[in-house]
Amino acid sequence: MPTTYPTELKFKIIRRYVKGESIKALSQKLHVSQSTLYQWRKEYRSIEMPNRTCTPAEFDAMARRLKKLEHYMEIIHQSGYLSSVPLQKKLATLEELYNRPDNPYSVYELCDALGVARGTFYNHVFRGADRSKYEEEQAQLMLKVKQVFDDSEQRFGAEKIRIVLADSGIHVSKKRILAIMQEMGLSSVRVDVKKQFKRKQQYEQQNLLKREISAGHPNQIWVSDIAYFSTFKREEAYRKDYTAEQHFCRSVVEHIRFYNEVRPHQTLNDKTSQAFEDAHKPALSESTV
């Protein structure tokens, strides 16, 4: 009956062989046939590899598996299936694998597997990062535009919103703001409101003073910048239904405050009337001294 040797003993004998003892000497000392020792050497001698150490039997198994995988790749490439997959789909698949926390593959391996140039893949990843950053900035800008638009009670158009944002340190073009307003369905007070109102109420404009401005006592004649009236009618009077005189008066006061303290004016270098006046107060004070 053949002798059965423990696996641990076989490893110890083969390690002695690796360290320099010959098969013949080991056979004589251990009383094991040389053919048996050669068989053990084939099965248990360690093979050093870059990432691990394996036995010849394990190495042969890996070689067979590698050959099998090479055949798989040849079949896939010869079938032409990869060439029929759109490039964008390949790039999306590669990006998903590349961004996995436990990704064991290098960029070279990923791109080579699907036949994609590494430069193309890197461009796709970087463009995606830039695109995500732009979309985030665009979302924040849309919120700012909506906020300024609502704060102005829907009075401001793209140019006025651009000026307000610039004053707060956000510099964007009027064209970009206009595109955002169109995307969000925002439009300032319609310029044809006055025409619509005229269809309902026809009135005759009268020049009561006829340039003969002579007041005998206070509060006999009140005058104002006509711009107040044009913007007040368009932005306030034509948009609201007043239920009481007090309601109308509050609306007038609020509009004057808004016109002087909030609305930027192009003729004042895109400043509000109040800001322009405050900026020139020192010069006015010196001129009166």
Image (cartoon, grey):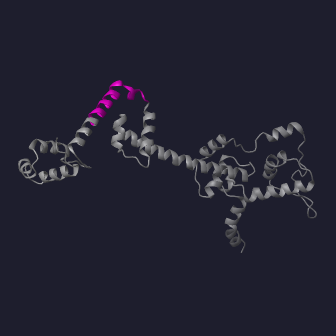
Please report the residue visible at 39 percent of the width from the left and 39 percent of the height from the top: 120
Q: 105 and 123: which one is in front?
A: 105
State the image coordinates of residue 288 (x, y, percent, origin top left): 72, 72
State the image coordinates of residue 185 (x, y, percent, origin top left): 69, 41
Q: 266 and 175: which one is in front?
A: 175
State the image coordinates of residue 96 (x, y, percent, origin top left): 45, 42
Against 90, residue 188 (above or below) is below
Q: Tell me if I can see residue 223 in this picture.
A: no
Against 220, residue 194 (above or below) is above
Q: 282 and 136: which one is in front?
A: 136
Tell me where residue 123 sits by quadrant: top left
Classify the position of the C terminus by image quarter: bottom right
| Residue at far top of view | 79
- Please state the extent of the stretch shown in magenta in the rendering: 66-85
Q: Is residue 109 left or right of residue 41?
A: right
The answer to whether residue 36 is magenta is: no
Please report the residue visible at 16 percent of the width from the left and 41 percent of the height from the top: 2
Classify the position of the N terminus by image quarter: top left
Please report the residue visible at 56 percent of the width from the left and 49 percent of the height from the top: 136
| Residue at far bottom of view | 289
Tag count = 0
Please report the residue visible at 9 percent of the width from the left and 50 percent of the height from the top: 26
Helix, strand or loop: magenta stretch? helix
Tell me where residue 260 sits by quadrant: bottom right
Q: Is residue 226 left or right of residue 80?
A: right
Q: Is residue 238 left or right of residue 51?
A: right
